[in-house]
Amino acid sequence: MQQIFISYAQDQAHGQRLAEQVQQQLHGAGFAVFRDVSGVIPGTKWVHEIERQLKASELVVLVVSAKALHSDWVFAEFDMAKEHQIPIIPVFAEALSAPLWLRHLQRLDFSREADWQRLMQAISSHITVPSPQAPYSPPVPVLVKQQPDLAWANASGDDQYGRYADVDVKGVIQRFRWLQPGKFLMGSPQSEKERSDDEVQHEVTLSQGFWLADTACTQALWQAVMGNNPADFSDDLRNPVEQVSWDHTQGFIQQLNGVVSGLKAKLPTEAQWEYACRAGSTSPFSFGTNITPEQVNYDGNYPYAGGKKGLYREKTVPVKSLPANPWGLYEMYGNVWEWCQDWYGSYPAEPVRNPEGSQTGVLRVVRGGSWYSVGWLVRSAIRRRLDPANRDDFIGFRLALGH
């Protein structure tokens, strides 16, 4: 399998997000990918491992951001690639002027919108793209294969995050994102600060892609389907619906599936939820090792792992008020805890495939934390268990479709 090396600077913003998206696209196209944050073995000398991986690569994708232009590591990787005569494709994550050392190379500008087909065409001019199928036109080939029926969608297309499809219920639009099949580490490493004992880290393979709502279910959508609004924070119908139990969500889903033919809505499994939340990351948050109230609606008076104190809103905020994660999903952290399909149970230690949690139980899983939660309770790995009849002003849900 041909390897592609992704060079970028960790900036918790444009460059890092685009690097994660490039990695996802290249994995989907059948390439092996090396990206330092997830590829270097602990205890290995960075400079030796970077050079070894570069030599093993057929091509370098250089993600250019403001921070990357001033990164000694990025420049060193660029220099090594030139020395070993490895083709380099610069992909600009921001609208920047090219420095002198990059001006001799034709670049791709993804500062406004990612054009994955152009990237794959550029790659194919240097090396052979894997075949058959090579789903690089994001991710339509996989959709055609795995999710052929979009009769439920009022609109669909591609943007900088990938494939989307919209459902219109009485004028209320809910967008869904197509998430590719993949493999990830679920739970948290023992080194993660303030972790819980029930977060045993284990490898999970999701062999089928799935659709996930890009936001929690809003009061507007609930009202359009159910004709009422149970929420406490009802000043804005764009706020997530809360005061809904797990049992209530099942009634909503049944009603919604009756309104929209072929929709097959459900709650995500716990594994699907964490896969989507992490969006390719292995850190405590998809935004990095810490968060701020500008990124997450949580109790900023009690930040994670000694971070800086900040704003505490003491209520929910409208969906899409805060930045999306690298896969285009909003407020996966904070705002409201989100019900999952699973009964709560212990994680396995061994690798698993398409897990659906315990088959029986008493309590259901909620994920993601809420506006009421302190910093460590909004991590990617955090999981809590509640009676399925429980309802409160910090509990909501988001929809998945399909399997």
Image (cartoon, rainbow, N blue to C red):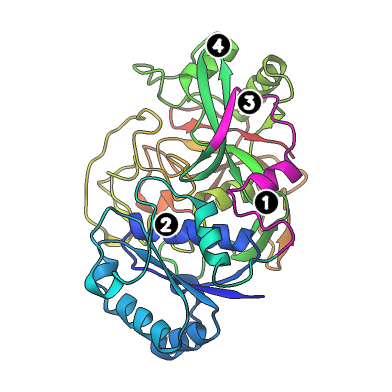
Where does the C terminus fall, quadrant-wise?
Answer: top right
Image coordinates for residue 130, horizontal then vertical, percent: 68, 66
Name the residue that disc number 1 marks. 345
Q: Label 3: state its secondary structure.
A: loop
Residue occupying the point 68% across, 16% down: 255
Question: Does the magenta segment cover residue 201?
Answer: no
Answer with left or right where residue 157 lies relative to residue 192: right
Q: Nearer the viewer, residue 323 or 57?
A: 57
Task: Give the magenta-colored segment's residue range.
Answer: 131-157
The type of residue carrying mark 3 is Ala
- Alpha-carbon distance for marks 1 and 3? 35 Å
Residue occupying the point 49% across, 48% down: 327
Q: Earlier in the sequence, mark 3 or mark 4?
A: 3
Q: Nearer the viewer, residue 210 or 163?
A: 163
Crowding around mark 1 (Cα neighbors within 10 Å: few <14, some 14 to 19, many 20+) is: some
The type of residue carrying mark 1 is Gly
Q: Label 2: state its secondary structure.
A: helix
The type of residue carrying mark 4 is Lys
- Alpha-carbon distance for marks 4 and 2? 35 Å
